[in-house]
Amino acid sequence: MFFPNVTGWDVDIAQSEKGVSFSKNTIVRTLVAANVFFILASFGVLGYFIKPAGGLFVIRYNVYFGVEIEGAWWQIFIPSVAAILFLISHFFLARRFYKLCERIAAYIMLFGSCLISIGVLIANISMVFINY
């Protein structure tokens, strides 16, 4: 066989990852890579469309009441920075859970951070759409 260390499809992924360190775990790497991708996409969208200006930008818009929150251009980047902070905190908590043999909790922490990053990307796209 060409790949002697490859686990077959009939083996559960949880069993195939037994004894693997946190940083070499396939699920952890995938979730962290997805987080980084969504955060970089978020910064990319904002960096491409939002330029420093003296005027106010719409940060929050409500269908019923119109513009609710306006701010300076740099305040639009706050949700993306918050997503980075969530990723860092969830990463360290997930690593702690993984060391305590609570791998499912670690995966859920990283998946939750991924969902937050997706939500921030959607919010940033809507802010760009409103201001562009």
Image (spheres, grey):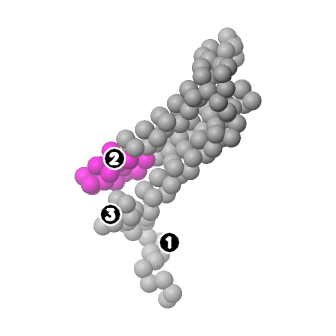
| Residue beneath disc 3 | 21
Which one is in front, 24 or 102? Answer: 24
- In the rendered image, the vertical position of residue 77 relative to residue 37, given as above or below: above
Q: Quadrant of residue 59?
A: top right
The C terminus sits in image quarter: top right
| Mark 3–mark 2 CB contact (< 8 Å) | no
Q: Magenta span has 98? A: yes
Q: Residue at x 62, y 17 (%)?
A: 70
Q: Residue at x 68, y 41 (%)?
A: 48
Q: CA distance from mark 2 to mark 1?
A: 31 Å
Prevailing secondary structure of the magenta residues: helix
Residue lying at the far left of the rendered structure: 100
Q: Magenta span has 96? A: yes
Label drawn at residue 81: none
Q: Three-letter amino acid code at disc 3?
A: Ser
Label drawn at residue 9: 1
Q: Position of residue 112 (x, y in %)?
A: 46, 42
Q: Three-letter amino acid code at disc 2?
A: Phe
Look at the image and tell me whether residue 14 can be seen: no
Which of the two labelled residues, at mark 2 and mark 1, occupies the earlier sequence position? 1
Residues drawn in magenta: 91-110
Tag 3 secondary structure: loop
Label drawn at residue 92: 2
Specify few, some or many for label 2: CA neighbours under 10 Å numbering under 14, 14-19, or 20 or more. Answer: some
Tag 1 secondary structure: loop
Specify few, some or many for label 3: CA neighbours under 10 Å numbering under 14, 14-19, or 20 or more. Answer: few
Tag 2 secondary structure: helix
